[in-house]
């Protein structure tokens, strides 16, 4: 690592433009703000406690490890003296039994200081001490407050002896904001605090991050600007430009915590609102490394190409961050000169973790390090989870649909199902973002007494209206790119044992609708082999791929008003895969959590 920490330490620009790496964003909301508006895919922390006048708190441990992490020394319990403050009417949740009295004092002091400076009390807050640094009788603390309408990150310095805050504090509030805080030691041996705080403001992206150097009574930004971080627009004895430069920087940038530092995204300067595709607003800009991690020592192409793959796979630049990227020698192929690196990623709020094995080709010469060229392919170990922000109005609309069926036997299309269901729990439902538009859909699978009456529904609530996006046989398979497959209700005439005939639909983001791509049937060789007397011999001459299966593909354009039946032209597997590629690509099946239709399960979404 560099012995100095410049304004942008270890800045490493990414090769290629945003369009070259296909960095897209899928959730763009209407109307400009201080930056092009984007729906930030986050999930709000779920802990909200409403009880009496007990005072306690919780400390959130930082998930990311860093070399030379600060060891927060704990002293004996000290009674929390609130005589100088207003009565503590707020209830805190204490989850860490080892939390000391001094920790409680720091939390309470910064919390009350924020209230006094704001001129109002938090409404129904839950507070936690994220991390702290001690030096020369002073302590720098980071406090996170979850409240009714918005969350707040507070950074401030307390005199340990007097319990006073001698200067102002830095605080930032936004709706559904989620912080990440890490303390680390710089090359000069001094500890620093890195924070990111990303959320929404008026439904639009609001984000900030910074590195704080702690010099006892003072705290100063070292990144993205240099200057006093204790004050806002007019810091006494310091340049007032630091705060304005800080605000201006985050008008057009987004930072996500990464191994060793942060990954920084920037607004595409060529983007024109209303003219360009919405996903082209954000582009990957560079990485900032503040401490040494295993990932920062990987060969240069590995991390950046892996991050570009993550952006393309999730179709959500700035929504997912890298937790780790480790060599996987067990999966390496020495004969093919292919190394494997295992990527673990999660959403910015820490949920939705998934893992993928990424394979890179390399050239190797004696006495020289391997030279990596490109990412060849990826194998995702777990399906990408749905990541929509729950909306109370949307869920209320879905609850009405479910209760109307449960209590009144009224189906989503308003048809009367009285008497056709022997047990309502035979019907199942799931609430998830199945098309990748950032909004939750309701998938309802109904199974009445008569098989011919089986029906599945995909519903969406948008612009104060409930829309049936699709209805069909209740056997759906959803994919991470928004497409889905619907199984046929019957498979008569299909000479298969493993393959079930189905229709495939592609998702159209522009109209938020589905379009039929076609229908696929199959003929498996094993069925002809075990039924030689009743079935014709399998046409092996057509099975060029020697897969033991042939496919019947009927494109949507052949299924119009004059449709008379599915194709009878059996084709090789390679033809089928070539037809399927533009529809699914490398999309993965989504695993939905279907629940029986009961009052107990519906209550979960109220």
Image: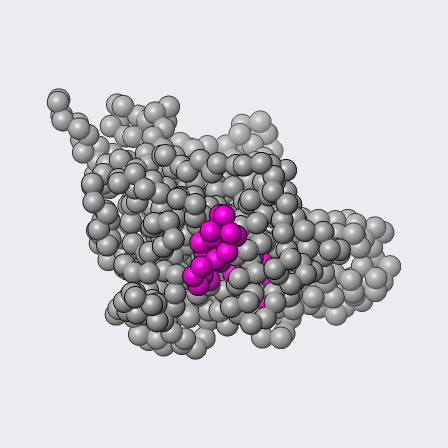
Could you say where residue 30 lies in the image, as x and y percent from the top left?
A: 45, 75
Residue 155 colored in magenta in the image: yes
Residue 492 to residue 481: above or below: above
At horizontal 48% and vertical 36% (from top left) the residue drawn is: 73
Q: What stretch is highlighted in magenta?
A: 144-171
Left or right of 440 in this view: 190: left
Relative depth, front residue between 454 and 269? 269
Relative depth, front residue between 424 and 431? 431
Left or right of 88 in this view: 542: left
Relative depth, front residue between 87 and 484? 87
Left or right of 351 in this view: 91: right
At horizontal 29% and vertical 45% (from top left) the residue drawn is: 289
Q: Can residue 386 be seen in this view?
A: no
Q: On the image, which quarter does residue 374 sit in?
A: top left
- All told, the count of numbered labels is 0
At horizontal 62% and vertical 49% (from top left) the residue drawn is: 80
Left or right of 476 in this view: 298: left
Colour convention of the picture: one colour
């Amino acid at each position: 690592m560099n012995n100095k920490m410049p304004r942008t330490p270890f800045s490493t620009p990414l090769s290629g433009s945003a369009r070259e790496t296909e960095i897209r964003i899928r959730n763009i909301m209407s109307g400009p703000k201080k930056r092009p508006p984007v729906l930030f895919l986050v999930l709000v922390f779920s802990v909200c406690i409403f009880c009496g006048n007990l005072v306690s708190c919780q400390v959130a441990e930082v998930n990311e490890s860093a070399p030379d992490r600060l060891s927060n020394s704990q002293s004996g319990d000290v009674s929390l003296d609130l005589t100088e403050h207003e009565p503590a009417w707020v209830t805190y949740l204490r989850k860490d039994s080892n939390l000391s009295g001094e920790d409680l004092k720091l939390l309470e002091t910064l919390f009350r200081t924020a209230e006094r400076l704001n001129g109002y009390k938090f409404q129904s807050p839950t507070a936690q001490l994220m991390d702290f640094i001690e030096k020369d009788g002073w302590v720098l603390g980071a406090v996170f407050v979850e409240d009714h309408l918005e969350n707040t990150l507070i950074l401030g310095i307390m005199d340990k002896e007097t319990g006073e805050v001698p200067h102002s504090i830095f605080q930032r509030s936004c709706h559904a904001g989620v912080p990440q805080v890490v303390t680390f030691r710089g090359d000069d041996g001094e500890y620093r605090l890195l924070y990111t705080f990303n959320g929404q403001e008026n439904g639009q992206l609001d984000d900030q991050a910074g590195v704080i150097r702690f010099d006892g009574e003072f705290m100063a930004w070292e990144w993205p600007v240099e200057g006093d971080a204790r004050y806002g627009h007019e810091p006494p004895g310091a340049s007032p430009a630091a705060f304005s430069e800080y605000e201006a920087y985050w008008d057009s940038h987004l930072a996500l915590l990464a191994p060793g530092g942060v990954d920084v995204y920037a607004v595409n300067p060529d983007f024109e609102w209303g003219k360009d595709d919405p996903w082209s607003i954000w582009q990957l800009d560079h990485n900032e490394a503040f401490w040494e991690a295993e990932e920062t020592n990987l060969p240069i192409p590995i991390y950046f190409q892996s991050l570009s793959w993550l952006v393309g796979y999730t179709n959500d630049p700035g929504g997912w961050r890298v937790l780790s990227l480790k060599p996987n020698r067990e999966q390496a192929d020495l004969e093919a000169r292919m190394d494997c690196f295992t990527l673990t990623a999660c959403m910015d709020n820490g949920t939705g973790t998934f893992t993928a094995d990424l394979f890179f080709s390399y050239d190797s010469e004696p006495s020289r390090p391997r030279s990596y060229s490109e990412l060849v392919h990826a194998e995702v170990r777990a399906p990408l989870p749905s990541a929509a922000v729950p909306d109370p109005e949307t869920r209320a609309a879905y609850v009405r649909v479910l209760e109307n069926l449960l209590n009144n036997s009224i189906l989503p299309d308003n048809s009367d199902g009285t008497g056709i269901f022997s047990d309502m729990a035979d019907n199942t439902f799931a609430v998830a973002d199945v098309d990748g538009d950032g909004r939750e859909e309701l998938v309802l699978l109904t199974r009445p007494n008569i098989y011919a009456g089986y029906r599945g529904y995909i519903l969406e609530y948008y612009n104060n209206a409930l829309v049936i996006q699709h209805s069909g046989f209740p056997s759906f398979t959803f994919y991470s790119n928004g497409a889905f497959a619907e199984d046929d209700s019957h498979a008569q005439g299909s000479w298969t044992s493993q393959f079930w005939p189905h229709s495939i639909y592609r998702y159209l983001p522009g109209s938020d609708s589905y379009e039929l791509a076609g229908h696929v049937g199959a003929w498996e060789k094993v069925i002809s082999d075990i039924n030689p007397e009743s079935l014709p011999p399998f046409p092996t001459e057509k099975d060029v791929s020697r897969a033991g299966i042939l496919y019947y593909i009927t494109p949507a354009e052949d299924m119009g008003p004059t449709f008379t039946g599915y194709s009878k032209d059996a084709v090789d597997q390679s033809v089928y895969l070539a037809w399927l590629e533009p529809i699914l690509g490398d999309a993965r099946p989504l695993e939905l959590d279907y629940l029986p239709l009961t009052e107990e399960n519906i209550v979960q979404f109220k």
